[in-house]
Image (cartoon, helix red, strand yellow):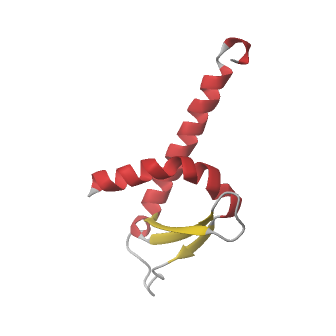
Amino acid sequence: MRTAQAALLIAMMPAALLAAPVGAQTTQVAPPTAAGPADRSQEIVCKRERETGSLVKAKKTCLTRQQWQYVQDTNQQFARELNNATMSRPGGQ
């Protein structure tokens, strides 16, 4: 099961990197109980991401807070590596 989740997260990375800042809306699926959830990292959060080039089409993705954090960290690392790779080439090539 974890392998399938990891594959899904890896497949989502480029789309999340491009789509998340544009129009991501966060919705909590499971409202916290009166005592509060014991482990907030396992709370499910859904985000609607607009499809690039469309004002109407959107994709809804639900993951746990821990999984969203992993996606964010992975996207930031990918962006850093991409930036470093392009900056280190002589002559900007």
56 sits to left or right of 75? right
Name the residue: 41% across, 76% down. Answer: 37
Residue 54 at x, y percent in the picture: 70, 64
Q: How many marks?
A: 0
Residue 62 at x, y percent in the picture: 46, 68
Residue nearest the observer in this picture, 93 or 41:
93
Outermost residue to the left: 1
Name the residue: 48% across, 83% down. Answer: 31
33 sits to left or right of 18? left
Q: Which corner quadrant holds the N terminus?
A: bottom left
Residue 28 at x, y percent in the picture: 52, 76
Q: Is residue 63 above or below residue 34?
A: above
Outermost residue to the top: 90
91 sits to left or right of 39? right
Q: Is residue 86 above or below residue 17?
A: above
43 sits to left or right of 75? left
Residue 34 at x, y percent in the picture: 45, 87
Q: Which corner quadrant holds the C terminus?
A: top right
**Residue 52 falls in which quadrant of the image?**
bottom right
**Residue 82 falls in which quadrant of the image?**
top right
